[in-house]
Amino acid sequence: MITIRKSRAGKQHYYRYSVFKKLEKGTQQVGALLFHVPGPEHLPARSLEYAQILGYGRMQTRCSARLNDGLLKVEFESTDSSKLQIPWRIDQERTYLLTTCSLPSSERPYYLTLEIARGTLSRLKNVLETCRASKIEVSDDVLQEHAESIQHFTIAATTDHASPESSESACKSLDAAVRAFTHLAVIYQDASLKFVKKQAPKRIFLFGCQLRDQVPSADASNTLKQLYNTAMIAPVWKNCEAETGHYQFDHIEQQIQWCRSNAMRVIFGPIANLDTLNVPDWFYLWEQDFTNILSFLQKYTEAIVNRFANHIDLWYCASGINTANALALTEQQQLHILVASIELLRSYDRKSPVLVSFDQPWGDYLRNTTRDLSPIHFAEEIIRANLGVSGIGLELNFSDCDGATFPRDPFEITELLDQWGSLGLPLFITLTVPSSKRNDPHAEIQLPAEEDLLFTVNRRFQRTFTEQIVPTLASHPLVQGLFWNHLTDAADHQFPNGGLFDRSDKPKSTLRSLAEIRSRYLT
């Protein structure tokens, strides 16, 4: 755990950190789950890259997974009962991140198909119970699919688990449960929307996209001003300060002017963004000197606030600090940067709301890292310090590549929003969904080879996945803003092919879906 203590030394306001390791190196208790696995038609080889262990409160645990002669072994730092979560291919079009029930460590292998079916059916039962308790009327189709799933699972569980019949029945149970979830998601979204409209009939919802360095073309402007009420101006540090201490903000002035001329609110940031697309080249000279790193970042932030404090509606202080990889920063240093940035913003502007956001909010990166803080615990430390944070951002960069978040279903997303909503602050979402499997020359990260992809990536996927999850996000009572993470594939960006406009700056069909969602859920 990392705690923040404020101290004073003359006029300097600094932070001291105490780090307490739960387990010293070499003393970790290791648990293991073993599974008989099916063929690659349901568990592709790269599924192991996303295999993760969920402990109490669905918290990620460091783990390693390996497959040998049809036996999957997952080792993790705990001896408690835990859940395995892993990508599971239902068919060629559908791959879901599915979870077993809580299982005790055992040297006797479980049967993965059966346990995935058990976990999915159990989760469906819990959602149906929530609907019943909330007086949400469920359709006959959902109830029939639930009954079908139970019937097939009963056969799978009472037949020799090693037999083809058991595996086939478990797969049929899974398919029925997934169909039930698909139908149930729409019912749940509509019920959530009715609740929100009843509780907050004049709700203000910020709906927009990130512009980065672009000023949209005339054609794009006509599309965007009809769809969005907000724009996120994300300054690129390397372009704003190509030489140390020499700032260039003219292009940002043009972006703000574009926003105002199109009647859009302005969210400025993220400012503290330490990924490789943003950090200036000269900054790496100081990579091992944290004092100078912090000093340069504060001077840059100060220059921005002095220039734009009277022209913005909300400060987006920092993004992805919990996973920043351009510099080899410790958790203490990451937290220090975030705290110092918030304090600096607040010292110049006490009125405008301040937002901080966190990458991979499920904590996917914890499965193969030595970090101690989960994303939500990172956020808790900031909130407890009472620094004046107004909202929490969750970065949902869905894709099948390094640094991205594997796609989740709407109910996984609802559970995430409920969990982060317990922090007591409004939530703001940034979203990316890929639209092509091709190499993206403007992207920092690329997708794996086509034959290694765990799910189909094309424009249809971007559109249909957006249609599934954006209503869930927009109808959640704790969410107050939703922003597409990059506008166009024609400009530099982090994740491949995730823009709303293609490399020729032509609109993708996802824009029509977003317009329909806005009409139904946000008006």
Image: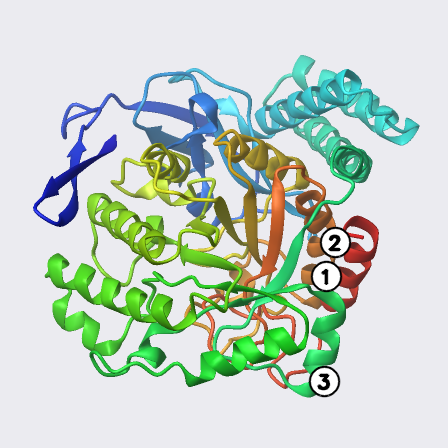
Which residue is disc 2 drawn over?
467
283 or 229: which is nearer to us? 229
Q: How is the image coloured?
A: rainbow
Inspect the image, locate mark 1, and give the three-letter code of the amino acid beneath it.
Arg
| Residues at discs 2 and 1 in contact (Cβ within 8 Å) | yes
Which residue is disc 3 drawn over?
219
- Is residue 508 at all visible to an observer of this figure? no
**Spot occupied by residue 234 in the image (x, y as percentages of width and height):** 46, 69
Residue plotted at (80% across, 24% down): 146
Q: How many marks?
A: 3
**Spot occupied by residue 263 in the image (x, y as percentages of width and height):** 68, 70
Spatial CA distance of label 3 from label 1 is 21 Å
Helix, strand or loop at mark 2: helix
List the single residue furthest toward the left. 10
List the single residue furthest toward the top. 158
Relative to 321, residue 122 above or below = above
Spatial CA distance of label 2 from label 1 is 6 Å
Badge 2 crowding class, 10 Å Cα cut-off, few under 14, some 14 to 19, many 20 or more, is some
Residue plotted at (68% across, 24% down): 121
**Spot occupied by residue 258 in the image (x, y as percentages of width and height):** 60, 79
**Of labels 3 and 1, the one closer to you:** 3
Inspect the image, locate mark 2, and give the three-letter code of the amino acid beneath it.
Glu
**Spot occupied by residue 97 in the image (x, y as percentages of width and height):** 57, 40
User: Which mark is drawn over residue 494?
Assistant: none
Which residue is disc 1 drawn over?
463
Quadrant assignment, res 243: bottom left
Inspect the image, locate mark 3, and give the three-letter code of the amino acid beneath it.
Asp
